Image (spheres, rainbow, N blue to C red):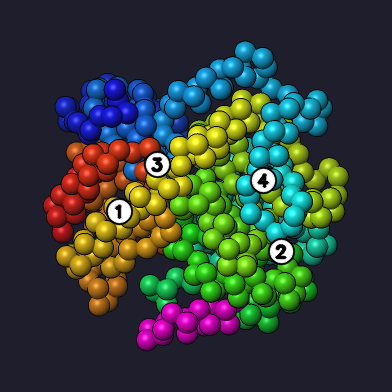
Amino acid sequence: MLKNALPKITTPLPGPKAKAIIDRRKEAMPGAIKCAYPCVISRGEGAMLEDVDGNIFLDWIGGVGVLNIGYSHPELIEAVKAQSEKYFHAMMNIVTHEGYIRLAEKMNEIVPVKGAKRKTMFANSGAEADENAVKIAKSYTKRPNIIVFSGAFHGRTLLTACMTSKKAYAAGIGPFPDGVYRADFPYLYRGPKGYTEDEAIAYYIEKLHKVFEEASPAEYVAAIVVEPVQGEGGFVPAPIEWVKAVRHICDEYGILLIADEVQTGFARSGRMFVSNYWEEAGCAPDIITTAKSIAGGIPLSAVTASEEIFDNVRAGIIGGTYGGNPLACASALKVIEIIERDHLCDRSLEIAGKCRKKFEEWKAKYEVVGDVRGIGCMLGMEFVTDKQSKEPNAKLVSDIVSKAAQHGLLIESAGVYGNVIRFLCPLVVTDEQLESGFGILQSAIEASI
């Protein structure tokens, strides 16, 4: 079975069938949507995919965090099929369908936002969830501004592109919405030289206070929006002591704390959400946005907040045609059931332990591996020219990604400088597949140095 297979490349990449389809892609699609890898999928199972030429790849990207329970889970297929035989669509502004209610009830049970009574709404993408969360925060607080962070990625809509730090995602599409202000994220590996971690966290909190002084007074800020682990920004985790301090600032000034768990959610961190760790530390967020692995690949996203927040949102500003689509809700309910039943949070920590051990070995062995970081199974390795200068080494990462693909391992870069390799492998990967991936990646590193 494909789900138990190991990587196997039998043709030069791209193979002849894949090349023909990629050539058609160039004619039919905008070039701005890049073709990153020399393969065309024909089927996928577990953590593995087969291309149209019969080459088999181990996927450490997982649709950029969409496939935590893997490709083509048979129970997911059956759940979506069963729903499809009843009805494909029912818009919640027009007619109620119970799948939306059942999923909202489940999300209210498992999503760790502040407030004993919670409510959830659904949209279609992470960007939509983030944009709705901002609208909800503004409607509730009656305030116009938000604060986001350096290194942030929140989407490509006009508002979320403005919230996103890297302007390659937004070049030439302004003017942008007003009222979005940016503070420095606690990127400790590249923090102030000579600082202890505690001193660095204090430094970054002071930089946040500077936003109140120099950009928007605190009484005009509706929300502070944080990725618990920055994704596109380089898999940089928010230190828990910094989160506690941000939570205190929010409570002091009546600001809502929004956790963007689009990429971090659904067992990736070793808990259902990174915010579970925050909750245990006494700093749970007010609003959590989720998407990606929520429905195993069917478009769906969610915004969860307390009843108090949602019940003070003006009617008409949230909702939409496809949000909470019946097929997506059926899929999401089954995804959550599988995660809980099959203990994928525990499996995430097992995989993370193996990965961190191996990555730390490489950090000790190779001068070009500058940092290993993350939470649970959301791990990144930052590559540099040397450990002393920490100069970003994007060219090396590009070479490693290319060489790994040629031998059947799909990995992806990330980071402000494009010099981080991220690990988002499906949590159903076998130990044998994981070891095979380590071997391919190590060979690619050594061949690229």
The CA span between labels 2 and 4 is 21 Å
Q: Residue furthest left?
A: 447
Which residue does the image show at 71% across and 64% down from the upper left? 256
The answer to whether residue 234 is above or below residue 101 is below
Label 4, label 1: how far apart the Cα atoms are: 31 Å
Residue 364 or 278: which is nearer the viewer?
278
Q: Is residue 314 above or below residue 418?
A: above
Q: Residue at x 33, y 55 (%)?
A: 353
| 194 relative to 152 in the view: left or right | left
Mark pair 1, 3: CA separation:
12 Å
Determine which residue is flagged by label 3.
427
**Residue located at (77% from left, 64% from top):** 144
> Mark 4 is on which residue type?
Glu
Q: Is residue 15 left or right of residue 61?
A: left
Front: mark 2 or 1: 1
Few, some or many C-alpha atoms within 10 Å of disc 3 (few <14, some 14-19, many ≥20)? many
Residue 150 is one of the magenta-drawn residues: no
Check disc 3 and give the amino acid type. Leu
Amino acid type at circle 1 is: Cys
Q: Amino acid at mark 2?
A: Leu
Q: Comparing marks 2 and 4, which lies closer to the viewer?
A: 4
Helix, strand, or loop for circle 1?
helix
- Work out whether mark 4 precedes mark 3 in sequence or the reverse, and give the earlier one: 4
- The residue range painted magenta reads 192-208
Measuring 75% from the left and 55% from the top, which residue is drawn there?
A: 116
Specify the label residue 355 is tagged with.
Answer: 1
The tag on residue 109 is 4
Residue with the mark numbered 2: 256
